[in-house]
Image (cartoon, grey):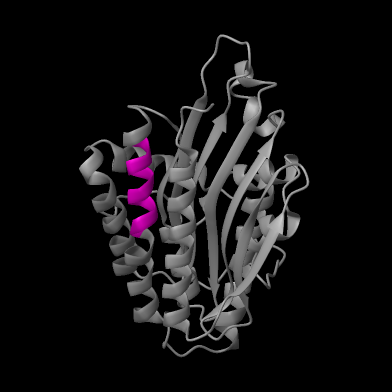
Amino acid sequence: MSNIPVSDVRDYLTGLQAHIVQALEQAGGEGFRTDAWQRAEGGGGVSRLIEGGQLLERGGVLFSHVQGTQLPPSASAHRPELAGRPWQAMGVSMVLHPRNPYVPTVHMNVRMFMAAARPGQDEDDVFWFGGGMDLTPYYPFEEDARHFHQICHDALAPHGDTYYPRYKRWCDEYFFLKHRQETRGVGGVFFDDLNEPGFDASFALLRSVGDAFLPAYLPIVERRRHIPYEQAQRDFQAYRRGRYVEFNLVFDRGTLFGLQSGGRTESILLSMPPMAQWRYDWHPEPGTPESELAAFLKPRDWV
């Protein structure tokens, strides 16, 4: 029998999904679709999604709890001693792609992974938590980036002074497109492999991150959602969304883990924007609002 209270984590995650969807439905005035699914290899999930909305052109708030008998390559490569163990992975993952180019795209994920002890073996269950959130504006506003990071900072502060600067730096390094030499957005916080100083403290930190999402993002939505825009701004949004696609398909560990472990493709790729563009060797004109974004796509202190 597992000594890790998996049901407590599952209850928190399903409640978090419901709370976030309810808040987004109230903000947008439009309902989310519910798509429950089962995985033949074990487990399943519930995808809550919206497409073609007035506020959210595409958005997904996904819960999954999947299981397997052997770790996939993306999970066991850095922990080879766990190879061959049965495993469970559960989490809430979300990406919101607003319609208005002045409202930033946002990503948040909180998750737990467990490799169970095998019967008859002298070993313990192993767990770790991971997650974070990051903001990807198309037309950046400094006050929005500062607000987002301040909420992230305040969420982690009760757990210790070192967490925010460490996880902020980790986010800057993780969400970095090496082939473009730019960050995906203005960052946030990111962490993985968290299991110290123990289950209770690690789970508490995870909850702090998950609970901080709505106060970090919704005030930005309300400030920007009614700014008028034209097709030129939508075209630039689609161009920058191409960078989002590049990161998710080339670097994102969650996407790679999901695909390698036989995850549900429709849910995994729901993070992709509904429309994106690529232009050959295109650069915005100097002095335009579009050219200002480049100054934000590099690590800097926001708090």
Location of residue 164 with respect to 244 vertically, above or below: above
> What residue do we see at 52% from left, 51% from top?
182
189 left or right of 124 in image: left
Magenta-colored segment: predominant secondary structure: helix
Give the magenta range. Answer: 202-212
Q: Nearer the viewer, residue 258 or 32?
A: 32
Q: How many marks?
A: 0
Query: Taking the image as drawn, is residue 168 in sight?
Result: no
- State which quadrant residue 284 falls in: bottom right
Image coordinates for residue 303, horizontal then vertical, percent: 24, 53
Q: Is residue 116 above or below residue 32?
A: above
Q: Where does the N terminus fall, quadrant-wise?
A: top right
| Percent x, y of residue 251 | 63, 44
Near-viewer residue (80 or 99): 80
> Which residue is drawn at the image coordinates 30% and 43% (left, top)?
164
Where is residue 60 shown, x and y percent of the image? Answer: 58, 66
Above or below 137: residue 131: above
The answer to which quarter of the image holds residue 289 is: bottom left
Left/right placement of residue 299 relative to residue 184 reads: left
Position of 39 compared to 228: left or right? right
Depth check, front residue: 112 or 3: 3
Q: Residue at x 71, y 43 (%)?
A: 42
Look at the image and tell me whether residue 5 can be seen. yes
Residue closest to the far front: 1
- Which residue is at the front of the view, 201 or 231? 201
Q: Is residue 207 magenta?
A: yes
Quarter of the image for residue 89 reads: top right
